[in-house]
Structure formats: C-alpha cells, structure tokens
Image: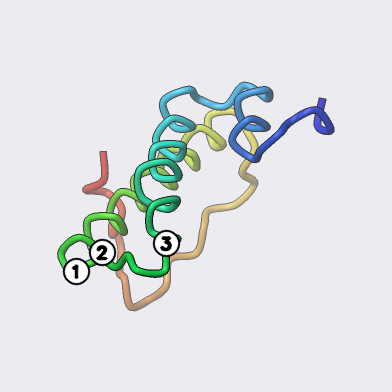
Amino acid sequence: MLGTASSPLELLRQNGADAKAVEAADQLRGLHRNPLMHPEDFLHTDDALDVFDLCKSAIKALMRDMDKRGLLTTEPEVPETLGEGWLDDVP
C-alpha cells in the first residue's frame, strides 16, 4: 500500500489517519502554501503568524492521531524557550 500514494497526504489517508487532521494539512497546502509559492506574493506579519498558528494546529492534530494509533514511542521534546504547555491552547 505504501507505493500507491500520489502524495504524502494521500498516503496518510490510505493508512487510516484521522480525516480531520489530514484535511487541516490539505487546507494549508491548498490555501496557503501553493499560493505563496508565487514570487510576487508575500505575507504581512499578522498573516504570517496566523498561518504559523494554523500549521501548529495541523501538526498537533496529526501528532494526536499518531499517538492514538500507537505510532509515537516517546514524548516529543519541547524546546526550553517555549516552555511547558506551549501547544495546549491549540484546538
């Protein structure tokens, strides 16, 4: 099954990843990453921070799904500069 995916997101879907988590990552790809690849596009600081927060949320959703399915073997290390609970406010 690993060889049949046309993209990393499709690979996640084919292997039973949480549909909402994959959709969050796919929305980032379609709505933010792809348009920003145009050389004349740029983000203002507030917009860049919003996209960064969306990325954190998508990553956290994917990590939760991996944890539920027993795919994580250790707790991720949190850089000391971020402190404890730095992702707790992400839905």
Residue 4: x and y in percent read 80, 28
Q: Which residue is mark 2?
A: 48
Of the numbered discs 2 and 3, the one sitting upstream in the chain is 3
Gap between marks 2 and 3, in whole Å? 15 Å
2 or 3: mark nearer the eye: 3
Q: In what element is the residue under mark 1?
A: loop
What amino acid is at disc 2?
Ala
Which is more toward the observer, 21 or 35? 35
> Quick check: 42 left or right of 33?
left
Q: Is residue 6 above or below residue 79?
A: above
Q: Which residue is mark 1?
A: 44
> Quick check: 64 left or right of 13?
left
Query: Could you classify mark 1 by the number of other residues whose Cα lies within 10 Å: few (under 14), some (14-19), or many (20 or more)?
Result: few
Farthest left residue in view: 46
Q: Quadrant of the N terminus?
A: top right
Q: In what element is the residue under mark 2?
A: helix
Q: Which residue is mark 3?
A: 38
Q: In what element is the residue under mark 3?
A: loop
Residue 77: x and y in percent read 50, 64
What amino acid is at disc 1?
His
Q: Quadrant of the C terminus?
A: top left
Residue 68: x and y in percent read 53, 29
Residue in the image at 64% along x and 38% along y: 71
Q: In the rendered image, which quarter is residue 86 located in? A: bottom left
Query: Could you classify mark 2 by the number of other residues whose Cα lies within 10 Å: few (under 14), some (14-19), or many (20 or more)?
Result: few
Q: In the rendered image, which quarter is residue 13 located in? A: top right
The circle drawn on residue 86 is: none
> Quick check: 16 left or right of 45?
right
Residue in the image at 36% along x and 50% along y: 32
Residue in the image at 42% along x and 41% along y: 30
Query: Could you classify mark 3 by the number of other residues whose Cα lies within 10 Å: few (under 14), some (14-19), or many (20 or more)?
Result: few
Which is more toward the observer, 60 or 31? 31
